[in-house]
Image (spheres, rainbow, N blue to C red):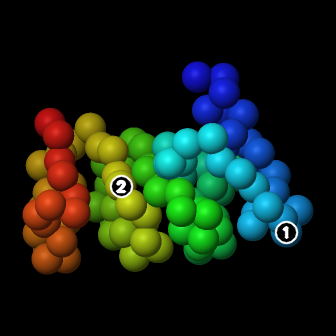
């Protein structure tokens, strides 16, 4: 777990320093909360930088429909939720259900 957290930190430090393109991720996805210690982690810039590096961005734990919509609008690749039925409803509203968004309850 420490290695994953260190990789997330390295990504955000590189992003902050304007050097995200030089970051060499250890994995294939960032699995993160929306913010940490009051700092937003899921922003248009961070999503774009992750995408440019070939990283998926999975965000946890999202239980509020407006927040689900906001994050999906930003282009995150996955949402983790304690209320999968609510998430399914949001995906149905967006016409986004199906294979791209598997939901595990």
Question: Callout 1 environment at 10 Å: few (<14), some (14 to 19), or many (20+)?
Answer: few
Is residue 97 placed above or below 23 in the rendered structure? below
Which structural element holds mark 2? Answer: strand
Which label sits on residue 7? Answer: none
The answer to which image quadrant residue 53 occupies is: bottom right
* Image location of residue 27, percent across then percent down: 55, 42
Can residue 58 be seen by looking at this rendering?
yes
Q: In this view, does 1 lie to the left or right of 16?
A: left
Which structural element holds mark 1? Answer: loop
Residue at image coords 58%, 22%: 1
Can residue 43 be seen by looking at this rendering?
no
Name the residue carrying label 2. Answer: 78
Residue at image coords 30%, 43%: 81
Q: What is the C-alpha distance between the residues marked 1 and 2?
A: 25 Å
Name the residue carrying label 1. Answer: 18
The answer to which image quadrant residue 66 occupies is: bottom left
Q: Which of 53 and 98 is in front in this view?
A: 53
């Amino acid at each position: 777990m420490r290695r994953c957290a260190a990789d997330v930190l390295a990504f955000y430090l590189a992003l902050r320093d304007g050097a995200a393109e030089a970051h060499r991720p250890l994995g294939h996805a960032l699995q993160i909360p929306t913010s940490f210690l009051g700092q937003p982690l899921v922003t248009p810039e961070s999503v774009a930088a992750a995408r440019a590096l070939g990283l998926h961005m999975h965000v946890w734990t999202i239980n509020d429909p407006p927040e689900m919509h906001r994050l999906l609008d930003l282009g995150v690749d996955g949402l983790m939720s304690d209320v999968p039925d609510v998430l399914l409803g949001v995906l149905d509203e967006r016409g986004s259900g199906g294979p791209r968004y598997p939901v595990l309850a």
